[in-house]
Amino acid sequence: MSFEYEDIGIHLYKIMTNDRTQSAQAPPANDFPTESFDDPVAAVTRLSAIYEANTAFLRDAFARYRRNEQFTHCVRACYPFVRVRTELNTQIDSRRSYGFVAGPGIYETTLTRPDLFGDYYREQLRLLAKNHHVGIEVGVSAQPIPIHFAFAEGIHLEGDLDRDRDRLLAMRNIFDTPDLALLDDRIVNGTYEPAPGEPHPLALFTAARVDFSLHRLRHYTATSPTHFQNYVLYTNYQFYIDEFVKLGRTMMSRPETRAYRSEYSSFVEPGDVVTYNANPGEQPEEGTVPARLPQMPAYHLKRADGSGITMVNIGVGPSNAKTITDHIAVLRPHAWIMLGHCAGLRNTQRLGDYVLAHGYVREDHVLDDDLPLWVPVPALAEVQVALEKAVAQVTQLEGTELKRVMRTGTVASVDNRNWELRDHREPVRRLSQSRAVALDMESATIAASGFRFRVPYGTLLCVSDKPLHGELKLPGMADQFYRAQVDQHLQIGVKAMELLRMNGLSKLHSRKLRSFAEVAFQ
């Protein structure tokens, strides 16, 4: 059977079913011509209407397909877009890091999930309108919405059908499916060059790239993207998660934490299991505990404004670290920090000492093609200060006593967990030449991903072994260390995030992470 698209004017399509023309579950074509708005709130309302109409149209068509109705036409609906046109170079406050375009031209991006990103879109468009005094154009793009992404919280479409291979193939002929050509990171990596006459990008990610990551986040973390908060902690050990869960549950239920817990509205665990900030015995049941934990479970200490703290157990290794940051980046968090264990490389270090990274030796290799090794990944002063203050407040140490338990220095990240088993003379020489004070497998990846995605980043590690000095990570030694140190380390990470939140975004989102001709969206 051959199929053709039947255009009704703006990439909304009707379908032919059982030789009868069925009305598409979407507004008439003239409801969504491209229109210019001065008010960003009105602009976002318009793109929301387009998005809801087009995804509802796809969901309705797929429901018919599931009922075995016969299609003679392909079904397609497209993402909304937003566009600005600037004719003159605009004098912009040089202290700003986003909210403006580089020069005269046409700038455009497709958008998705206004229910999730509505506040973000309104703020980005407000700054554009304010800085350039231009209208904001909203319309329907030519970029198809893959049928998988029309279901916001995800649905295994193929699994929802019967196992007839011909039927699965027919689904791909009728509906658009994810196209890798629209999911790459060329804009993020600075390698994207618009063709002559093509608009410049307004955002780091296309709508399809965002949708791809939103669906992957649920898969990897077993929580909805709607629960993720703007401040993210990563860890490589379950012990930290255990303490975070204890903190979250305690804060939601115990009367003695009332003053502190009033800052947070709920605590969410894998399976979207929600514990609300309520009086004991008044907790509504929500979510289902998964039969097994996902690859990288996420936990969320939520605030009403989204500025709470998310913690993710990324496990061991740079591959996981890259995978999860690739996807969390589309949520545009305000900061992320690595809390984990490391090998101390200096004889003066003791087990339980902290390492505040101010530089990285990148031997993880997972980002070599996206961020060349010659690109420096600098420490960010705002994050460094918050971490140092947090260590001081939690340990109640200062001055030389603080320096006794925390060392600032270079952290090396490698992709070989058993690097000690090699002829260690050569790696030890390199580590010494780099002035490294600690070694792990994830921190450089987290930091480099933050640099690449323009997300403020930081690293605070805890020395759990000293392999160059005979103090290996063995069960008895490790258990004693974990009991004594993890709780304090987690408290420091949470405190650092709260300090960053109190400092405000104008300081955190600085110009350090922005390139020459940067996109306007943060």
Image (cartoon, grey):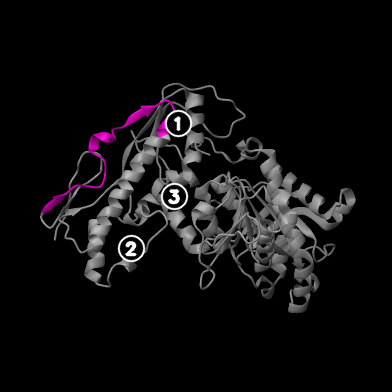
Label pair 2/1, CB-CB below 8 angstroms: no
Q: Residues within 10 Å of mark 2 (few under 14, many from 20)?
A: some
Residue 207's x, y, as percent?
40, 46
| 62 with respect to 346 (left or right) | left
Residue plotted at (76% across, 50% down): 390
**Tag 3 secondary structure:** helix
Magenta stretch in the rendered image: 20-43
Residue named by callout 2: 157
Residue toward you, 186 or 369: 186
| Mark 2 → mark 1, Cα distance in angstroms | 35 Å
Residue named by callout 3: 210
| Mark 3 → mark 2, Cα distance in angstroms | 19 Å
Hey, what amino acid is under mark 2? Leu
**Tag 2 secondary structure:** helix
| Mark 3 → mark 1, Cα distance in angstroms | 21 Å
Q: Residues within 10 Å of mark 1 (few under 14, many from 20)?
A: many
Q: Earlier in the sequence, mark 3 or mark 2?
A: 2
Residue named by callout 1: 40
Residue depth check, mark 3 versus mark 2: number of the one nearer the observer: 2
Q: Earlier in the sequence, mark 3 or mark 1?
A: 1
Residue plotted at (69% across, 51% down): 261
Say if 492 sits above or below 481 in the image: above
When asked about the image quadrant of residue 488, the answer is bottom right
